[in-house]
Image (tube, coloured by chain):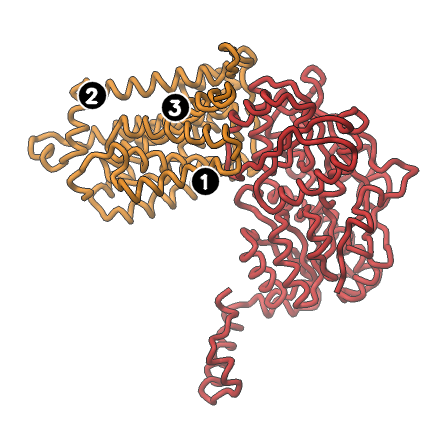
Amino acid sequence: MSTLFIQQVLNGLLDGVYYLLIALGLSLIFSLGGIVNLAHGAFYAVGAYLTIVLGPHIGFGGALIVSPLLVALLGIAFERGLFQRFYRADPILSLLLTFGLAMVAEQVLRMIFGAPPLSYVIPAELKGQIFIGDFIYSKYRALLLVVAAACVLGLWFLLQKTAFGRVVRAGVQNPDMVGALGISLNPYMMTVAGIGIGLAGLAGVLLAPIYSIHPAMGQEIITPAFVVVVIGGLGSFWGVVVAALLVGVVKGITIGLGYTQWSTAVIYLMMLLVLLFRPRGLFGERIQRFE
Amino acid sequence: MSDFKMTPSEFKQPRLSRRQALAGIGAATAGVIASPSILLAQTADVIRFGHLTPRTGFLGPLGEYGVMAVDLAVEEINAAGGIMGRKLEAVKEDSVNPQTASTKAERMVERDKVACLIGEISSASCLTIAQVAARTKTLFVNTGGNSDALRGESCNRYMFHVESQNSMYVKTCGRSLMAQGLVKGKKWFSLTADYAFGHDLLRVAKRFMEGNGGQFAADKLIPTDATDFSAVLLEIRAAKPDLVISNLAGNQITNFLKQYSEFGLTFPIAGFGFDTALAWAAGKGNFGGTWPVVWHHLLDTPGTKAFVAAFTKKYGKPPENQAWGDYIAFKIMAQAMNEIKSTDTAKIMEHWEKGAKFDVLKTRPGYFRASDHQMIHEMYTIDALPADKIKNQWDIFSSSSAVPGPNEDLEVIATTKEEATCKMS
């Protein structure tokens, strides 16, 4: 195996991390509330646009903290105002709601910021490369990786090791039983939506300096993120993590073998295979109410 | 589209029954009552131009500039007395995709009685609109579709092109590359958008490169929805090319430029398809390389200065090259109608085919070439300015002088007789 091929596999691992921040939120909100949030990408876009607005005043570092918090608050407002009415309803209704919301959000961004893409440049101190042997990596992406890994670990800790996480996990499996035990899921749902949507906002901030910022950018990221969730399996935290890395690696291998034109198609091919042979996803748990 | 399809039984039964006839009259009456625009369309004091361009999707940002320019052009034309004393009105629609574009074009011609169709960016939509134009004998002026095929095997008597063809872009930028010694004996790493436009551009680029002694280090097709180029950047770094060539499209170019700068690769970079909005979106410090454009806002001509001033006054930012395309198309259509005192399609075509000249805001006037209806005019290459010379977010590039030069035939950058395959029917 050539070193370039190994580089591609490694780069693929890292590539997958970008989908992860979006996919984790999607998976959380779906498993607990039963809502397929098609507007998730819109919150990612809002995060990116907030970086443009806030960046000149509080710097990239400030935007990195403030924008996701603002997006999370926005998410909580939508959860309280809209999503919570649809937890027990036919999934098709929430699908329609969030689909509409995504379109409205895109148009609002277009009306405020205009249709042409806007620019945002990486802060000078984060530009440049890191060399590990022959492997080259951008300094900025290394930072991105650290932030994303911290988020994943933090979320894992929250869900697995705290009282909060126990209730959420129980709520995913059997909301009625949780209710019967006298625990209201409402505040939990609100927090989970806030965290999930905040993560999308964070992804928006992190990717603003390297991806094109335009009103429809949410649509670009939502489809691959969904594919990751489907491959990983609903309700499984590590399933989503593994799927994101797997998608990245398979993409890397495809490009490493010289089939760049297949690099997008191969993701959907993977989803197709998973749906055919293991419809629950690689690590999907059996969730009573979705069977 | 389904509205226009006939069921098999209608084909078999050409004779109308009385019931069908009555139902038809009823429907027609209801139609007239329901759509007052039919009545409006017949008023004599207004002339309508149909404008179609993508306003959503990955070409939407460029389309938006086109729409802004159309509004400005219509205002200016009406302020100058309209067309033969009649008021000009633009009927504007989002063309969305080739199928929708054709349906909407048909509706503009049949219902709104537009005098002509203008617009587009997608070459695929140009093709379907051109088919409607030919069927209904309506003029269509393409303002943004680059594909050579539209001026070649798919050319059409009723379609004229203000936008330059891919060959003109390639030969313009190619001259700059030759001058920098980046062609003969050099290895190119080429990235191509994996759809019709990219393939057409790659074909022309390859012809140019091979004709001038260059070769590919690699030639990669990139899916149109790819946003991350890190893997491709690793490939480029390993291949050590003399030049990185982009045949990418739209947001792909912005993404690529941002990440190329992020990874700090230093191979020279150039491209064969470009719009200034993409340079602005990449931003100061990220934008790099040599790129061809059909027009840009820094040209030092009286026409361009006036257009840029009017546009900036109205919208608070300078126009993009797509704005130029739609603005010019409206202006020359109005000019032609005023000059020949008619809106008759055949007469305008004859006028243009005879080589009528127009001010296209450049040094030399432009004209349509009769053989393939391509507008023959000057083009430019732009080079990214170093960061310390940039004063604001718009003026981030320097321009070559006009290509071809003042003493050359304007047609030298267009397809040659051997390359062109257009047979007007």
Marks 3 and 2 on same chain? yes
- Which element carries disc 3, helix, strand or loop? helix
User: Which amino acid is tagged 2?
Assistant: Gln
Q: Earlier in the sequence, mark 2 or mark 1?
A: 2
Judging by colour alone, the chain drawn in red in this rendered image is B
- Which element carries disc 1, helix, strand or loop? helix
Q: Position of residue A248 (x, y in %)?
A: 42, 28
Q: Is residue B396 visible?
A: no
Q: Which residue is mark 1?
A: A265
**Front one among B338 and A173:** A173
Q: Which residue is mark 3?
A: A68
- A109 relative to B143 in the view: left or right: left
Mark 3 and mark 1: Cα distance apart in space: 31 Å
Q: Quadrant of the C terminus of chain B?
A: bottom right
Residue at the image position 40 percent from the left and 40 percent from the top = A268
Q: Position of residue A170 (x, y in %)?
A: 15, 30
- B56 relative to A77 in the view: left or right: right
Mark 3 and mark 2: Cα distance apart in space: 23 Å
Q: Disc 3 or disc 1, which is closer to the eye?
A: 1
Residue at the image position 20 percent from the left and 42 percent from the top = A290
Disc 2 to disc 1: CB gap under 8 Å: no
Q: Chain of mark 1?
A: A
Q: Earlier in the sequence, mark 3 or mark 1?
A: 3
Mark 2 and mark 1: Cα distance apart in space: 35 Å
Q: Which residue is mark 2?
A: A160
Q: Position of residue A281 (x, y in %)?
A: 27, 37
Q: Disc 3 or disc 2, which is closer to the eye?
A: 2
Q: Is residue B191 visible?
A: yes
**Front one among A68 and B175:** B175
- B381 relative to A8 in the view: left or right: right
- B12 relative to B377 in the view: left or right: left
Q: Is residue A2 above or below residue B206?
A: above
